Amino acid sequence: MIKIGYGAGHGYHTPGKRSPDGEREWSFNNKVARAFANELALYKGVITKRFDDPTGETDVPLIVRTNGANSWGADYYISFHHNALSGRWGTHTGVETYTFTYPSPQSVALANAIHPAVVKAYGLTNRGIKRANLHIVRETEMPSILIEGGFMDSTIDIVKLRNDEIIANVGKSVAQSLARFLGLSKVAESEQETPVSTPSRPPVNSLTPTPVPTPSEKPSQSSTKLAVDGYWGPATTRALQRHYGTTVDGIISGQPRNPSTVNIPSARFGSGGSQLIRAMQKDLGTTVDGFISYPSLMIRALQRRFGTTQDGFISKPSQLVKAMQRALNNGTF
Ligand SMILES: [Zn+2]
């Protein structure tokens, strides 16, 4: 398994880091990061882990991000950012990718493999691959790059950043160029739909050894359609975690024991709450505490969204969970 660490720069509330109209850099970064992970989930032999807070609530310190990626043993790291010049609208423009001031050859190879796809996906001026003494590319022990995708204070670039289709395509393109760089192939189903151009491996001696997935390896869960059975088990939780860009482990951690959570096979009882539930609550506009309470406003909001009975309760099986599974399968969640 090739391990890819990634993150959206900053946090939602980080001071500065916004367009002259108040749009948050993290929100742009987050959209690219999510599209990146969703696309990479279609490939086999690769696993991703995100090192910022996927809800945006906290700006995870850089040292925590790089220590996390190092101790996880990431093989590559990609940091998603958007640029700013003065914080006042101007016509400066373009996309740049950074490596450390003294980059490893593997970092340079990674930048070379990905930067052209980034330029193309934004459709903006190519400002080139640059070097800088930035924490995230300096302290990561694996090949790493930081992508600055256009200026938030540019009247030219902001048009692209405000276009969700373009910005999602950026994340997708980064994933596709990374997959080509690593010689990854898609899991069987999608392979037929979207043939990947001939995978080219980078020169062997310029890379850390990377395991090659064997044909017998079982396809990653992402390709498999969820059973629409109304049971909120690990597979459904994993699909939700991929959707929301939280750690994909199939577990809803830190939950109170109540009539709802005892019906959720992927729930673990304890304190602290779940990152996934926090992300869902944020998405649904209910109180963000990470807990599925009984009854739950978040569950009620989901029931409203999917048109099932609004009782704030998860039964086993559950009509709501069936509707969620259908939507996750169709990409309409
Ligand atoms: Zn930034």
Image (cartoon, grey):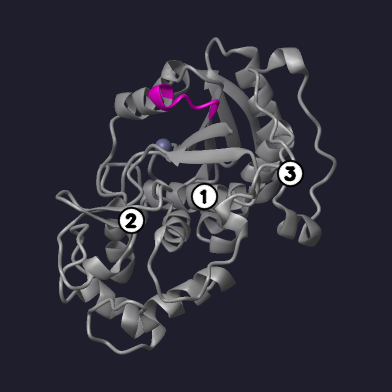
Q: How far apart are marks 3 and 1 (CA)?
A: 21 Å
Check disc 2 and give the amino acid type. Answer: Leu
Discs 2, 1 touching: Cβ within 8 Å: no
Question: What residue is shown at x 44% (from left), y 37% (from top)?
Answer: 85
Asked whether mark 1 lies closer than 8 Å to ligand 1, one says no
Q: Nearer the viewer, residue 168 or 325?
A: 325
| Residue type beneath disc 3 | Ser
How crowded is the residue under tag 3: few (<14 C-alpha within 10 Å), some, or many (20+)? many
| Residue under the point 51% across and 76% down | 326
| Front residue of this view, candidates 53 and 185 | 185
Q: Distance between the residues labelled 3 and 2?
A: 28 Å
**Mark 2 element type:** helix
Spatial CA distance of label 2 from label 1 is 18 Å
Quadrant of ligand 1 in image? top left
Q: In which image quadrant can residue 223 be found?
A: bottom right
Mark earlier in primary sequence (3, 2): 3
Of the 4 image quadrants, the one containing the N terminus is: top right
SS type, badge 3: loop
Q: Name the residue under label 1.
A: 32
Question: Disc 1 residue type?
Answer: Val
Query: Viewer-nearest of labels 2 and 1?
Result: 2
Indicate yes or no whether the magenta region holds residue 278: no
- N-terminal-most mark, 2 or 1: 1
Residue 23: which quarter of the image? bottom left
Judging by the rendered image, the residue that carries numbered circle 3 is 185
Image side of residue 196 versus residue 298, left or right: right
Q: What stretch is highlighted in magenta?
A: 70-76
Q: State the image coordinates of residue 88 (x, y, percent, origin top left).
A: 40, 46
Report x, y in % for residue 270.
Answer: 16, 51
Mark seen at residue 276: 2
